[in-house]
Image (cartoon, helix red, strand yellow):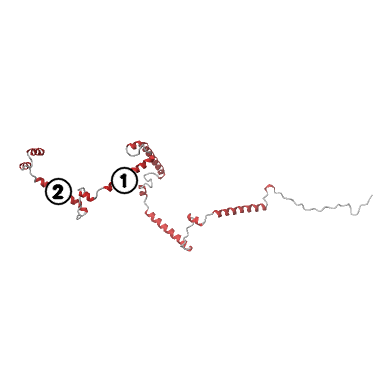
Amino acid sequence: MAKKSKGGKNKTPTPTPTASVKTLDGGPDQEPLATDEQATAKEQRRRASQKIDHMLEVRPDAEDLEQRNVLPTASPNVAPTLQGVQKMLQRKMSADELAHKLESRPDVQELRDLAIVHGGDGVAPSLQATQEKLQRQLNSDKVNQHLTKRPSIEELRTTGVLETSAELAPSLTATAKKLERNLVQNQVSHLLESRPEKDELVHQNILEDQDAAVAPVLQGAKHQLERQLKADQIARQLRHRPSVSELEEKGIVDGEEATAIRQQSD
């Protein structure tokens, strides 16, 4: 039988423990890595930069903004340091002008009289729109009624309101009227050219000769006095004219003529 070695039983060497590294797997809910966030932010900055560049390219210039009254028009005769004061003075002048116009504006009653403002006839403001709508409807119905009763073209031609000819097309009626007016104008011009002179009319006793020593405003009174003098002279001569018997005695009229004159007088 073999001897046991000193020290007891044989011992096997124990292996040295090593630290195990666990790999953590967060699963599908794990946040993306930092590199993906940086790429997304970079893409967003690139898109924003492109958008800003596009807006800068299409933005209007200063002249367009001045024409649209977005920017005030800068006066070349005014120093830049004084343009603000100039604008303030212009606004003050505009405010004064507006205040003057407001003072001289018509009141509500005048606007109602001119039919610019409606309402105020005992109608509530909430019903004024309905009232105006009804009034417009009444006016429309009235106009339609007049249109249905208006005369036809033939009736207007018969009454002489329209002078269109049945032998002419409507498009030629205006030309025919224009030619007719030209003919009348030519006839009047010819008559005016051939009319007698003023001296000739005076010589023919058509016009009375005006006395140069009398003012034109007194010519009418002068002619009226002359006519009155002539009428008085004729009346005086008629009062002193011889009778029929005297004319018969003087042999101016014979017996038959005297008898006829007496019969006419009776």
> What amino acid is found at the position of numbered circle 1 in the picture?
Asn
Residue lying at the far front in this picture: please name it: 194
Horizontal side of 85 relative to 42 (left or right) equals: left
Q: Which residue is mark 2?
A: 230
Q: Counting residues from the N terminus, which is met first, the one under dot 1 or under dot 2?
A: 1
Q: Residues within 10 Å of mark 2 (few under 14, many from 20)?
A: few
Q: Amino acid at mark 2?
A: Lys
Q: Helix, strand, or loop for circle 1?
A: helix
Residue 129, compared with residue 53, is above or below; it is: above
Q: Residue at x 45, y 61 (%)?
A: 86
Indicate the quadrant containing the C terminus: top left, top right, bottom left or bottom right.
Answer: top left
Q: Which mark is residue 186?
A: 1
- Crowding around mark 1 (Cα neighbors within 10 Å: few <14, some 14 to 19, many 20+) is few
In which image quadrant can residue 166 be found? Answer: top left
* Secondary structure of the residue carrying numbered label 2: helix
How many labels were placed on the picture?
2
The answer to whether mark 1 and mark 2 are in CB contact below 8 A is no
